[in-house]
């Protein structure tokens, strides 16, 4: 206890003799900004980038480039029920969306389609999901105006730095999210995919083959170039430099900035829970109906084999035993756990 009392007296003496005593509140804007929340990265993975992104300032904004890592390294096995080929879903953003909609012990049906003009218009659920995003834009503008009215130059510089960081990340991600390799085109052909994710989550995706390829093959974000890496590093350095900038802001400016970060973070988190579909490359992927529960994996395999009229994909995925697959026509489908 005497040690803590001595330290307290030492700090108190230093603050009393210092011309500008240390204000612990000045650390809050920087600490809140550096909070490792993936709220912005989650929205980026599901909705892509928007020109309004630089005005959405929330905790964890420096983690937006990690949107490609939210799937936590999972590349689930996928079978084409129409052809029998088995491969993996390679697009990280699609894998993350499948993880969100999948339920343990349930089969979730999804459909993929072209995003026509009518499909580009937001539905009622999407309008509600975007309300928080646009509210966050308004909150950021209001906070900047409030800090300016307080004549808090350092607080305004702090907010300006955050906007600059978001702008740099927006440009870099736009450069990296150009359409890449989708395989050979197969116009007019319908596809039917069955995906097995971790935690016994099963997903069935149906739609045109070309649209399925665009959303499951390749990658959403290409590897960063040297220029992308440089500007990404600059953005990260600005985030940490901002901590020092906030130390000179007034108390009122600190309160305003912290309130903005908290409100915007909450709005984006609520919006992420309501995003109903994946939008990418002018294509959409969304759930159809409610997930259907299966008490045994055997029942699911039997149903899909019957509907597809083939069992080679099930053998390749290990859902049925190979030597028994040849006798299914005479003895029925035999499935192992």
Image (cartoon, rainbow, N blue to C red):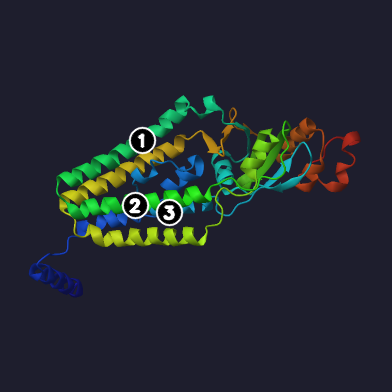
Who is closer to the viewer here, 47 or 97?
Answer: 47
Q: Is residue 68 left or right of residue 151?
A: right
Query: Would you name the residue on which mark 3 appears?
Result: 63
Q: Residue at x 39, y 54 (%)?
A: 62
- Disc 3 and disc 1 in contact, CB within 8 angstroms: no
Q: Is residue 74 above or below residue 103?
A: below
Who is closer to the viewer here, 278 or 15?
Answer: 278
Can residue 238 be seen from the camera position used here?
yes
Q: Is residue 11 above or below residue 156?
A: below
Query: Would you name the residue on which mark 1 appears?
Result: 134
Sequence order check, earlier mark of 1 and 2: 1
Gap in angstroms between the C-alphas marked 2 and 3: 14 Å
Q: Is label 3 in a helix, a strand or a loop?
A: helix
Image depth: mark 1 or mark 2 in front: 2
Q: Is residue 298 left or right of residue 255?
A: right
Q: Quadrant of residue 203?
A: top right
Gap in angstroms between the C-alphas marked 3 and 1: 20 Å
Sequence order check, earlier mark of 3 and 1: 3
Q: Residue at x 77, y 30 (%)?
A: 307
Q: Is label 1 in a helix, a strand or a loop?
A: helix
Q: Is label 2 in a helix, a strand or a loop?
A: helix
Who is closer to the viewer here, 93 or 273?
Answer: 93
Q: In the rendering, at what x and y percent does residue 216 appear?
A: 64, 44
Who is closer to the viewer here, 139 or 13?
Answer: 139
Q: Is residue 252 above or below residue 299?
A: below
Q: Residues within 10 Å of mark 1 (few under 14, many from 20)?
A: some
Query: Would you name the residue on which mark 2 appears?
Result: 164
Q: In the rendering, at what x and y percent does residue 12 appear?
A: 12, 68
Q: Residue at x 19, y 71 (%)?
A: 4
Q: Residues within 10 Å of mark 2 (few under 14, many from 20)?
A: some
């Amino acid at each position: 206890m005497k040690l803590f009392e001595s330290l307290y007296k030492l700090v108190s003496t230093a603050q009393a003799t210092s011309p500008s005593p240390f204000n612990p509140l000045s650390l809050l804007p920087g600490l809140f900004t550096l909070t490792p929340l993936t709220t912005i990265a989650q929205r980026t993975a599901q909705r892509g980038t928007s020109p309004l992104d630089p005005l959405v300032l929330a905790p964890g904004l420096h983690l937006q480039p990690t949107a490609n890592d939210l799937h936590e390294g999972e590349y689930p096995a996928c079978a084409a029920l129409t052809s029998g080929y088995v491969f993996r879903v390679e697009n990280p953003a699609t894998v993350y969306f499948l993880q969100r909609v999948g339920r343990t012990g349930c089969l979730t049906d999804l459909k993929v389609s072209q995003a026509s003009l009518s499909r580009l218009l937001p539905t009622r659920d999407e309008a509600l999901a975007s309300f928080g995003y646009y509210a966050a834009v308004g909150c950021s503008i209001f906070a900047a105006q409030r800090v300016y009215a307080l004549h808090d130059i350092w607080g305004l510089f702090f907010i300006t730095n955050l906007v600059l960081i978001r702008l740099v990340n927006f440009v870099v991600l736009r450069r990296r999210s150009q359409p890449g390799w989708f395989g050979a085109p197969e116009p007019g052909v319908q596809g039917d995919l069955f995906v097995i994710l971790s935690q016994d989550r099963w997903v069935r995706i149906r739609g045109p083959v070309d649209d399925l390829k665009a959303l499951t093959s390749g990658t959403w974000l290409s590897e960063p170039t040297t220029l992308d890496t440089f500007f990404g590093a600059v953005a990260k350095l600005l985030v940490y430099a901002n901590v020092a900038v906030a130390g000179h802001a007034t108390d009122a400016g600190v309160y305003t900035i912290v309130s903005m970060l908290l409100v915007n973070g909450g709005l984006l988190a609520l919006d992420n829970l309501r995003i109903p579909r994946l939008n990418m490359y002018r294509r959409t992927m969304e759930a159809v109906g409610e997930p259907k529960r299966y008490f045994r994996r055997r029942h699911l395999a039997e149903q899909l084999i019957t509907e597809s009229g083939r069992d080679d994909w099930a053998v390749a995925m290990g859902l049925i035993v190979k030597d028994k697959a040849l006798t299914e026509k005479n003895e029925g489908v035999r499935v192992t756990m």
